[in-house]
Image: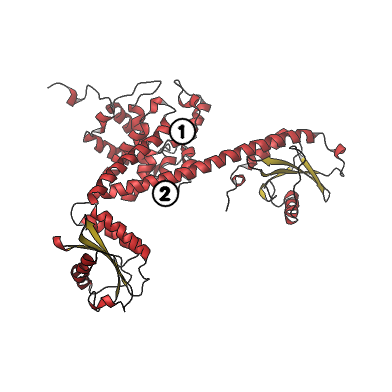
């Protein structure tokens, strides 16, 4: 289904515009190109009834020129203004006025003002539709990029976290068994006495140990000699006379090469009731076998991918922070400190992942703040600060379109809430504020104090800790402050790496 931006627009504000500009009090609706109402000031009123009748008869909505059009029908007068999009008509702004007996000359004088207002309203709605379409396009592109980045990040993390030895294969085999919906996945390398397996059983296999012995025996020897993948689906396959005798399982076996020699086999096994292994499955098996035979090369490639991941993330943040050189590096520092707090709190992996993206992208909404406000060296006026207050909601509007980031959005959206309820955008208080948002708020406050701005120099680590402690219970969550203070007691390396000032009067800084 195609997306209609008219359904996302706050049409009520344009209705108020018409009411302020004219004194007619006309009923108003916004319709799509087919005449179906997307919004109506009176969904059950006379205008809605007339529009339904026009839609039922497939009314063509004729337009003579670009100005306000008129239709007299059943004792009423419909006035409508076309909405023009880049590629064609978007729809119409329609109002219902008193009937004039079909005589245009007797139209109220106020219609002139109404015509001008509708023309302005239509242009504003068309512009807003264009902006929404561009935002949706950008959100789609961002979604694709973030999905790619998350995949790269997940693979990199999995490989870095893998221990040496057989567990390297176990993790990959488990993923492969689940991906292929196979009952058993096994990697067999007899010369090293290695036989690693993972299960994703659709039904029990009571003799699994014997099955694995058979894999290490005749199945491996046959694959070693044939040097070809083996697929056995049928119980009548003649190879069952000497391979997997009396074991009615479906088998996919792919040789693993090192140079020109077969050094191992990769095996998938299914119950006889499951679908046959296909040539597509065989190709996937060969691909994984090649990966397993070149693990060292994969590590090298994944190292480069990890660098790419970091560079892509840095490029995204650069797009946000390029508007204000005084906040350069802010997102990276807040992200790093928030992750330190999250790890110290022993957050589960999924929450850490949400914190990862939420803290990294918490200020992405600042893209929409005018430079004159964002980079102003002096104190902001009330209206200018209102622009600043918009940025968490702007972050939400951008990130909410990305399915993968749904868990990260609350942290970015509510990091400016205060523990006592006096923050923004929604005035949440206490534990109603999402947990990750409270973590990001502590990290964000610390960096705001210790980093330099156009109007002041950054203050010391000790000053920041004292100020954060003063804000416990009012602006910030005391429990998260306590965790952050424990993190800082260990003198983390990022204090020096981020060039954060230290108080020269602290005890450890004094000469012996």
Residue density around tag 1, few if under 14, some if 14–19, many if 20 or more, within 10 Å: many
The spot of residue 155 in percent (x, y) is 31, 49
The spot of residue 430 in percent (x, y) is 40, 42
Q: Which secondary structure lies at badge 2?
A: helix
Furthest residue in direction left, as rendered:
512
Q: Nearer the viewer, residue 32 or 486?
A: 32
Q: Mark 1 points at which residue?
A: 366
Image quarter of residue 431: top left
Q: Which of 439 and 117 is in front in this view?
A: 117
Q: Is residue 13 left or right of residue 81?
A: left
Q: Looking at the image, how many numbered discs can be counted on the residues? A: 2
Q: Which secondary structure lies at badge 1?
A: helix
Give the CA separation, mark 1 to mark 2: 21 Å
Image quarter of residue 445: top left
Query: Is 175 placed above or below 81 here?
Result: below
Image quarter of residue 457: top left
The spot of residue 503 in percent (x, y) is 25, 23
Query: Is 490 placed above or below 278 here?
Result: above
Identify the residue shown where x is 57% and y is 49%: 3
What colouring does the structure picture have?
Answer: secondary structure
For marks 1 and 2 on the same chain, the one whose residue lies earlier in the sequence? 1
Q: Which of 211 and 462 is in front in this view?
A: 211
Q: Name the residue under label 2.
A: 404
Q: Can residue 408 be seen in this view?
A: no
Identify the residue shown where x is 44% and y is 36%: 364
- Dot label at residue 420: none
Marks 1,2: beta carbons within 8 A: no
Q: Can residue 428 be seen in this view?
A: yes
Identify the residue shown where x is 19% and y is 57%: 166
């Amino acid at each position: 289904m195609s997306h209609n931006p008219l359904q996302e627009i706050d049409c009520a504000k344009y209705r108020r515009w018409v009411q302020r500009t004219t004194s007619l009090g006309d009923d108003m609706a916004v319709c799509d190109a087919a005449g179906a109402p997307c919004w109506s000031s009176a969904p059950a009123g006379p205008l809605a009834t007339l529009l339904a009748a026009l839609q039922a008869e497939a009314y063509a909505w004729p337009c003579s020129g670009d100005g306000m059009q008129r239709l007299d029908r059943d004792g009423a007068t419909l006035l409508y203004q076309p909405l023009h999009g880049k590629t064609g008509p978007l729809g119409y702004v329609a109002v219902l006025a008193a009937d004039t007996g079909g005589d245009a000359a007797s139209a109220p004088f106020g219609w002139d003002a109404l015509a001008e207002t509708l023309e302005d309203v239509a242009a504003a709605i068309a512009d807003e539709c264009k902006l929404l379409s561009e935002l949706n396009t950008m959100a789609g592109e961002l979604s694709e990029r973030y999905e790619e980045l998350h995949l790269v990040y997940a693979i990199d993390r999995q490989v870095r976290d893998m221990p040496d030895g057989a567990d390297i294969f176990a993790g990959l085999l488990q993923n492969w068994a689940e991906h292929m919906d196979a009952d058993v996945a096994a990697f067999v390398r007899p010369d090293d006495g290695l036989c690693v397996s993972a299960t994703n059983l659709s039904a029990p296999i009571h003799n699994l140990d014997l099955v694995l012995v058979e894999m290490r025996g005749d199945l491996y020897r046959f694959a070693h000699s044939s040097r070809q993948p083996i697929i056995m689906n049928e119980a009548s396959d003649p190879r069952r006379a000497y391979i997997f005798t009396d074991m009615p399982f479906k088998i996919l076996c792919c040789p693993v090469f090192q140079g020109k020699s077969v050094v191992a086999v990769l095996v998938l096994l299914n119950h006889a009731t499951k679908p046959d292994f296909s040539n597509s499955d065989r190709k996937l098996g060969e691909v994984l076998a090649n990966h397993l035979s070149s693990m060292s090369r994969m590590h090298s490639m994944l190292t480069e991918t990890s660098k790419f991941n970091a560079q892509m993330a840095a490029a995204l943040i650069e797009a946000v922070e390029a508007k204000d050189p005084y906040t350069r590096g802010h997102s990276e520092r807040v992200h790093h400190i928030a992750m330190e707090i999250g790890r110290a709190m022993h957050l589960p992996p999924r929450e850490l992942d949400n914190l990862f993206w939420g803290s990294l992208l918490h200020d992405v909404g600042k893209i929409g703040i005018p430079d004159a406000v964002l980079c102003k060296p002096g104190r902001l006026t009330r209206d200018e600060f209102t622009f600043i207050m918009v940025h968490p909601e702007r972050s939400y509007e951008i990130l909410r379109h990305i399915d993968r980031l749904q868990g990260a959005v609350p942290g970015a959206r509510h990091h400016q809430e205060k523990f006592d309820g006096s923050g923004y955008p929604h005035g949440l208080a206490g534990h109603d504020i999402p947990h990750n948002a409270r973590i990001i708020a502590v990290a964000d406050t610390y960096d705001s104090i210790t980093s330099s701005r156009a109007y002041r120099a950054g203050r010391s680590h000790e000053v920041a800790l004292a100020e954060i402690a003063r804000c416990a219970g009012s602006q910030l969550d005391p429990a998260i402050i306590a965790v952050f203070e424990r993190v800082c007691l260990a003198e983390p390396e990022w204090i020096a790496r981020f060039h954060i000032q230290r108080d020269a009067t602290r005890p450890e800084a004094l000469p012996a």
